Image (cartoon, helix red, strand yellow):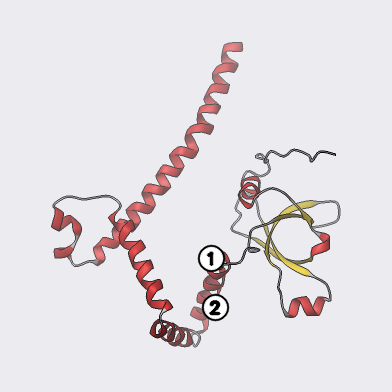
Amino acid sequence: MKVRSHFKRWFFTGLILLIPVLVTVYLFMAVVDRMDGMLHLIPTAYQPDQLLGFHIPGLGVLLTLLVVLLTGMAGASFIGRWLVRLGESIVDRIPLVRSVYGAIKNVLETIFQDNKDAFRRVVLIEYPRPDLFVLAFVAGEDQGEIQHRTGERVIAIFVPTTPNPTSGFLLYVPEKDTIPLDMSVEDGMKCVISAGVISPEWSAPAA
């Protein structure tokens, strides 16, 4: 019975160690393969495989990064900004497309903007009723009209769902009703994705 218990423990320990590695490798290779498909946009005679005579995995990644970099450089120029405004004015006239484009752009700007308060803090709030607590991520603090209308200092927080943190709820909560946590956003995400199974280590401050 004791040997069986050891084998069972070793088996599940092996799964815990191997599955994250295998999934990570699989996803990484899938992304590399998908980006390598970008090479087909180059005329056949000029594709690296044709010029070199053999395939080098990962060239598509370099091509994608180069395209993104060049697009960013062009978009940051005077003419580039003018073209972007022109393109967005055209998109804004197409009902369904403008909604999708606007939503995606707003999300990306929120994630990549140089804002130290955007998704950088983890807090606890009482939700959906008093004495029940959920993890939430601070999304922003300067809410303009919302701040003015509420008459309080409110912050925008994102309450993710478990185990899929890409969906959730946007709430505007008075800052005084939040409980700041010491854990990082990464640790908070691990806690959410694992449905609370993984909890970051914490030591109570000395009295």
Q: Nearer the viewer, residue 91 or 200?
A: 200
Name the residue located 16 percent from the left edge and 64 percent from the top edge: 46
Amino acid at circle 1: Phe
Name the residue located 83 percent from the left edge and 72 percent from the top edge: 152
As helix, strand or loop, the secondary structure at mark 2 comes to helix
Amino acid at circle 2: Ser
* Quadrant hosting residue 74: bottom left
The answer to whether residue 1 is seen in the rendering is no
Residues packed near mark 2 inside 10 Å, few (<14), some (14 to 19) or many (20 plus)? few
Look at mark 2 in the image and give the residue it sits on: 99
Look at mark 1 in the image and give the residue it sits on: 112
As helix, strand or loop, the secondary structure at mark 1 comes to helix
Q: Is residue 169 left or right of residue 164?
A: right
- In this rendering, the answer to whether 11 lies above or below 123 is above
Name the residue located 47 percent from the left edge and 33 percent from the top edge: 18
Q: Are marks 1 and 2 in contact (CB under 8 Å)?
A: no
Q: Nearer the viewer, residue 24 or 9?
A: 24
* Quadrant hosting residue 176: bottom right
Residues packed near mark 1 inside 10 Å, few (<14), some (14 to 19) or many (20 plus)? few
Q: Quadrant of the C terminus?
A: top right
- N-terminal of the pair, mark 1 or mark 2, is 2
Q: Residue furthest front?
A: 207
Name the residue located 43 percent from the left edge and 86 percent from the top edge: 82
